[in-house]
Structures are given as C-alpha cells and as structure tokens.
C-alpha cells in the first residue's frame, strides 16, 4: 500500500510540474514541447550563428547540431545571403535598374521616356493595375472622385488642366515617389507595372 501511495504522489507531483512548466511570465519563457515547431531550422538570411553547438541543450535536430545554429556550410564563409559581385548594380527580374531620382527631381523625371512598348495587351494590364491601385482615390474616370479621394480631398483630377499635358516620366515619378497628398507607391508597385499604369492614364483616362 505504501508503494502504491508513493507512486500516486510521484505521479501527481510530476503532473503538477508539467502543467506548471507550460506557463510563462516575465523573464521565464517556460518549457517548449517540440521546439522545432517554434524555432525555424531552415537558414535565416539576416543572422549568422556559426557555432554548431549553440543551443545544443534545446536541440532535437536530426543533424546533431545546436538548435540555434543557422549557417550555411555550402557557401563561402558559411554565409546565408550571398554578397553581390563587387562593383555590380542589382536589377529587377524584369531587367530594370534601381530608380535613383529623388522626390524633388521632377524636371529630370519628365525627360524619361516610357520603356514599355505600347500595345492593346499592355493597355489592358494597365487598366487592371489602375483599378487596383488608383481608383480608390482618383476614381474610375480619373476625376479625383474615388471613395477615398472624397474623404481625403484635394486629389488630382487627371483630366483637368495641366494634368493633361504632363509627360509620362512625370506621372511615373509621382507614382514612384509621391507628391503632395499622393503617397509614394514605389515600394508597392514594380517599375514595369507603373509604366503600364502611365500608358493607361495617357491613352484612356486623358482621352475620354
């Protein structure tokens, strides 16, 4: 009876410890079950831990290395992200160089010609992109009467006055870098797509 009683006490104590370990507060992270479900094993591009024993106390990795080791033994210097070739300039997958003009360099931007050859297909793609990114403020017809535009106020009427004669490079630059109430969209829309929007604005919106 005493042995059975002791087993019950040990079992209850173990269960209590297990449940208590699941809690985390303050500086106590608690214990993790199956840590690989929380800590990514694949290579992390922006960190570099070359010590293969780092986190070995936590690891359940099949390769026997520590949980936090994340270097790439297949690359020089165990790097994860490969450095670009010296004195080279990155291009997008479409072959475009980074856009270097600053927001205030509108005159220089106005001299840039649209590198995307015009076609009915490009016009159709530009229409779709305009609907995705521009209609909310400028409206379907470009008159600055989109739902968001009505709330913001002061949105450009692309059919009005000086906007009709704006060079394509100017329109591209404003979409890229922003101007006035117009926010910069260069981080959201690739250059090629912006040029397609420019085609649509010039060939459809401003000719209606």
Image (tube, grey):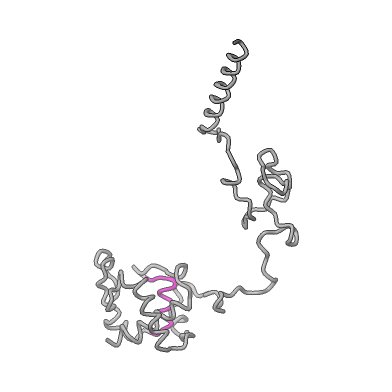
Of 150 and 200, which appears nearest the observer?
200
Of 185 and 123, which appears nearest the observer?
123
User: Residue 34 in the image: x percent, y percent?
Assistant: 59, 42
Of 67 and 83, which appears nearest the observer?
67
User: Residue 182 in the image: x percent, y percent?
Assistant: 36, 69
* Vertical arrangement, residue 139 with respect to residue 60, above or below: below
Picture quarter with the C terminus: bottom left
Q: Is residue 189 magenta?
A: no
The residue depicted at 38 percent of the width and 82 percent of the height is 124
Q: Quadrant of residue 147?
A: bottom left
- Residue 185 appears left or right of 89: left
Q: Is residue 174 magenta?
A: yes
Q: How many marks?
A: 0
The residue depicted at 53 percent of the width and 24 percent of the height is 16
* Vertical arrangement, residue 100 with respect to residue 1, above or below: below
The residue depicted at 36 percent of the width and 83 percent of the height is 200
- Residue 79 appears left or right of 176: right
Residue pushed farthest top? 2
User: Residue 122 in the image: x percent, y percent?
Assistant: 42, 84
- Residue 51 appears left or right of 7: right
The residue depicted at 57 percent of the width and 22 percent of the height is 11
Secondary structure mostly seen in magenta is: helix
Provide the residue span drawn in magenta.
Answer: 167-179
Q: Quadrant of residue 104?
A: bottom left
Picture quarter with the N terminus: top right
User: Residue 37 in the image: x percent, y percent?
Assistant: 57, 46
* Vertical arrangement, residue 21 with respect to residue 122, above or below: above
């Amino acid at each position: 009876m005493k042995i059975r009683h002791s087993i019950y006490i040990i079992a209850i104590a173990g269960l209590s410890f297990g449940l208590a370990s699941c809690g985390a507060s303050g500086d106590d992270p608690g214990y993790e079950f199956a840590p690989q479900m929380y800590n990514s094993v694949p290579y992390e591009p922006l960190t570099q831990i070359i010590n293969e024993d780092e986190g070995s106390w936590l690891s359940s990795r099949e390769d026997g290395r520590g949980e936090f080791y994340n270097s790439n033994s297949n690359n020089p210097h165990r790097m994860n992200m490969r450095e670009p070739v010296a004195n080279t300039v990155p291009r997008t997958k479409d072959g475009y160089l980074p856009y270097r003009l600053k927001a205030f360099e509108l005159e220089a931007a106005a001299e840039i010609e649209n590198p995307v050859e015009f076609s009915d297909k490009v016009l159709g793609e530009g229409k779709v992109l305009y609907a995705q990114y521009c209609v909310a403020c400028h409206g379907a017809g470009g008159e600055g009467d989109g739902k968001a535009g009505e709330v913001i106020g002061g949105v450009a009427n692309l059919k009005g006055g000086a906007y009709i004669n704006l060079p394509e490079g100017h329109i591209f630059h404003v979409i890229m870098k922003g101007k006035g109430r117009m926010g910069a969209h260069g981080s959201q829309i690739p250059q090629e797509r912006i040029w397609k929007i420019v085609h649509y604005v010039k060939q459809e919106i401003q000719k209606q």
